[in-house]
Image: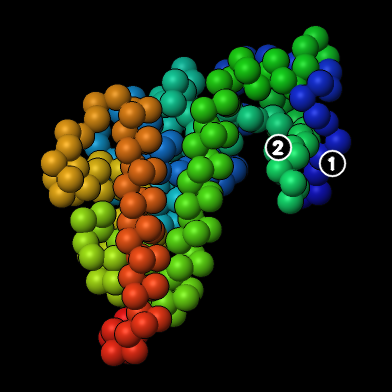
Amino acid sequence: MDLDFCLDREAAFSFTCNVCGRCCAGKIIMAGPHEILGMSRVLGIGTTEFLSLYTDNGGTTLRSEVAGPCVFLTPSGCRVHPRRPLVCRLYPLGRSTDERGEERFALFPAQPECEAIVGRDGTVGSFLESQGVGPYLGWSRRYGELYRRMMGLLDRLGIEGKIDAPAAAAPAEAARAGSGSAGSGQEPDRAPLSSWQNIDASLDEYCAAKGLAVPAEIDEAIALHLRAIEDWLDDLESRLGEVRNNPKEASEL
């Protein structure tokens, strides 16, 4: 689908959802670790159970029913609406950023028989504010930065496949484990692509190793999860620096 990213935050735009549910079908909904945590809390379950029950593609997308609707769509609306993912908050807008980080927005074509009303009574910016996208944009940016850093480091180690990197494990050992399965017994595309996808499990391990209490609040848990990933990457980079001066260790990696 070709979209015209011609809108900025000052562009005239408004959107009124009438909860018909037609927009919530036939789409691939991406979900990051922070979004999975929020939705799991709304449902009263942990992220391990959430990943097993409600995600596909290595824990990166929400599962859809056979007929096409999102797994969380009910006759009365979305079961996880208070913590819905960023892509749902943005809809019917798409967002793109260039190499300088400048953002532009596009309007998706109307879903057939959709009862929502698109108008010009506000701005793109006011719509985004009403949908609470601010924190989600920040979290997505931060996770994206760490993911790219992780891919670069694992590429330097010559590691492919899953990023199965327990928080408390030695970085080199954790990285080597990345080429194996997640060990969960789930179907391959439903096993998390990375152990970092599972915030509850990775924070339990990280906090146990560091002597910390696992945060109860969602925002605090996300912040600590980002810190845990960064710590792991820092350790891995440090080990890579040591490897350059130790050919024997390089061969073991």
Circle 2 sits on which residue? Answer: 94
Left or right position of 134 against 224 = right
Q: Residue at x 37, y 35 (%)?
A: 223
Q: Amino acid at mark 1?
A: Asp
Looking at the image, is 195 positioned above or below residue 84? below
Q: Residue at x 25, y 71 (%)?
A: 173
Which quarter of the image is occupied by the C terminus?
A: bottom left
Circle 1 sits on which residue? Answer: 4
Compare marks 1 and 2 and give the one earlier in the sequence: 1
Q: Amino acid at mark 2?
A: Gly
Q: Measured from the top left, where is residue 68 in percent x and y?
A: 53, 43
Left or right position of 145 against 182 = right
The answer to whether any part of residue 3 appears in the image is yes
The answer to whether any part of residue 185 appears in the image is no
Left or right position of 153 against 234 = right
Q: Nearer the viewer, residue 98 or 186?
A: 98
Circles 1 and 2 in contact, beta carbons < 8 Å: no
